[in-house]
Image (tube, grey):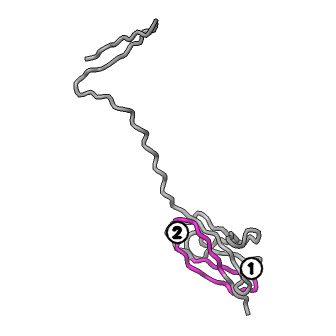
Amino acid sequence: MYRFIFVFAGSLAILLFASCSEGFSPTAPSAPTPTPTPERTTSSFVGNIMDADIFRKCIENARAEIIAGPLSGTIYPQNLELCGDPGAGFSINDLPIGAVLTLRASAPGYTSVERDFVIARFAHSIDINLKRAE
């Protein structure tokens, strides 16, 4: 059953419409459901290639190369302007979370170093120290 109600306020008439149906109970509008944030699938890390014998000395012409795993064969030259503490002498992005990779750090006149990494959900920073070649 429907009911029309007229309310007079001065010279203004307002029409209200109400329903008296059984089982009907008005409810407040619900808040919109938030859109879930998509699950992160890639991560990154930054690093410095440093001289093992000189505290915090970044090595000129150093490079990091992925030799196994995702992006294998990709070379990341060290940027001396960004190298330091904390630094980003090299930066590797878009690595699948959970992936395992082997990274080789090298520089002319130094012995290369290889390290294995598991890519974590959040970016992190690494320092790789190289010893001078004898």
User: Residue furthest toward the bottom?
Assistant: 134
Across and down, in percent, residue 125 comes to 62, 71
Q: Is residue 120 magenta?
A: yes
Of residue 58 and residue 13, the one placed in the foreground of this image is 13
User: Residue furthest toward the top?
Assistant: 11
Distance, label 2 to label 1, CA atoms, is 27 Å
Relative to 37, 16 lies left or right: left
Mark 2 crowd level (few <14, some 14–19, many ≥20, 10 Å Cα): some
Relative to 35, 92 lies left or right: right
| Residue drawn at x 42%, y 9% as measured from the top left | 13
The numbered disc on residue 75 is: none
The stretch in magenta equals 102-128
Dot 2 corresponds to which residue? 120
| Residue drawn at x 39%, y 33% as measured from the top left | 29
Dot 1 corresponds to which residue? 57
* Looking at the image, residue 36 lies above or below residue 112: above
| Residue drawn at x 38%, y 11% as measured from the top left | 7
Q: Which amino acid does label 1 sit on?
A: Lys
Of residue 5 and residue 30, the one placed in the foreground of this image is 5
Secondary element type, mark 2? loop
Of residue 36 and residue 95, the one placed in the foreground of this image is 36
Q: Quadrant of the N terminus?
A: top left
Residue 89 found in image quarter = bottom right
Q: Quadrant of the C terminus?
A: bottom right
Q: Which amino acid does label 2 sit on?
A: Ala
